[in-house]
Image: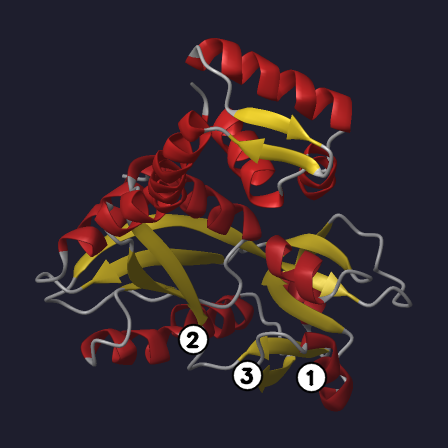
Amino acid sequence: MEIRQLIYFSTTFRQGSVTRAAEELMISQPALSRQIRRFEREIGTPLFERVPTGVTATAAGVALYRHALAILDLAESAAEVAVLAAPEAETVEVGLAPGLPGAWVDTLLSAVSKHVILARINFTDADSDTQLRMLREDRLDIALVHQPPPDGLVSYSLGEEEFGVAVRPAESMSTAETWTMKQLDGLRVLVHAKNQLPTVHYPLISAAHEVGARPLWQFANYTHHAEACADAAGANVAIMTRAEAERLLPEWTWARLVGPSVVLKTWSARQPVTRAVVATVDNAIRTAFPIP
């Protein structure tokens, strides 16, 4: 006996007509008639009598109808019972620092999906200082930041990326594959403000000083509107990673910055005492980024 057969039988019983039941079930009348006859053969007794107005249930049909309704009610609630019995997924709040490559985020989500079944990731875009403050205030579970996490946190280096120069398409050097720090001398250069990328601020200025370059640094806080910030500052070049340039300045040409190069490092950080699911998600992230 199949649930489908009970649905066909109970609908026909309720409608008192094979034709009307077939319309409700959205199948053809001959097909429903065949199913009813097959079901009667399996049961071993007639369930309906044919009358001029349609069909009427036999004593066996009436008795079976009561059981059919109970079985169908149980079948309908089976999925709900299973869902209610299953453990509920816990939300893990993860911070994303500016410039984090989209491929890294995809890798993170894939690792969590593979290794942590009962976790739901909720991302927050925020600079490193803001994330670390949210971590201390228990408003964030895991911070992905661009500065070394302070002592007392469980932290791990995820990796690093090279900085480069994003150049407006109209600039004569927009087709160059590399830029030297010396070439930035005298140019208005858009750079993330110190609070957004503190570990890059001083190395960048120091690197320019070492080679005698004096760029006109235009520091700005931005996560989405880099081009608007560059327009407002009158900057035709911007210092950022390739992933960030592809996302924020897709029409600009990106080139590696060399002589000397500057890198953007990323760490994960969390509180040492935390929920089990947070520690499990953190371990999954570490597995996905096995950087010594």
Res 221 label: 3
Placement of the C terminus among the 4 image quadrants: top left
Closest to the observer, 123 or 217: 123
Q: Of the residues under marks 1 and 3, which one precedes in the sequence? A: 3
Going 41% across and 26% down the picture, which residue do you hit? Answer: 60
Residue 163 image point, x, y percent? 56, 58
Mark 3 and mark 2 in contact? Answer it, CB < 8 Å.
yes
Looking at this rendering, what residue extends furthest in the bottom direction?
232
Q: Which residue is mark 2?
A: 127
- Disc 1 to disc 3, C-alpha distance: 8 Å
* Within-10-Å neighbours for mark 1: few <14, some 14–19, many 20+: some
- Disc 2 to disc 1, C-alpha distance: 17 Å
Tell me: 169 left or right of 89.
right
Q: Is residue 289 visible to us here?
A: no
Q: Which residue is mark 1?
A: 229
Q: Amino acid at mark 2?
A: Asp
Closest to the observer, 112 or 56: 56
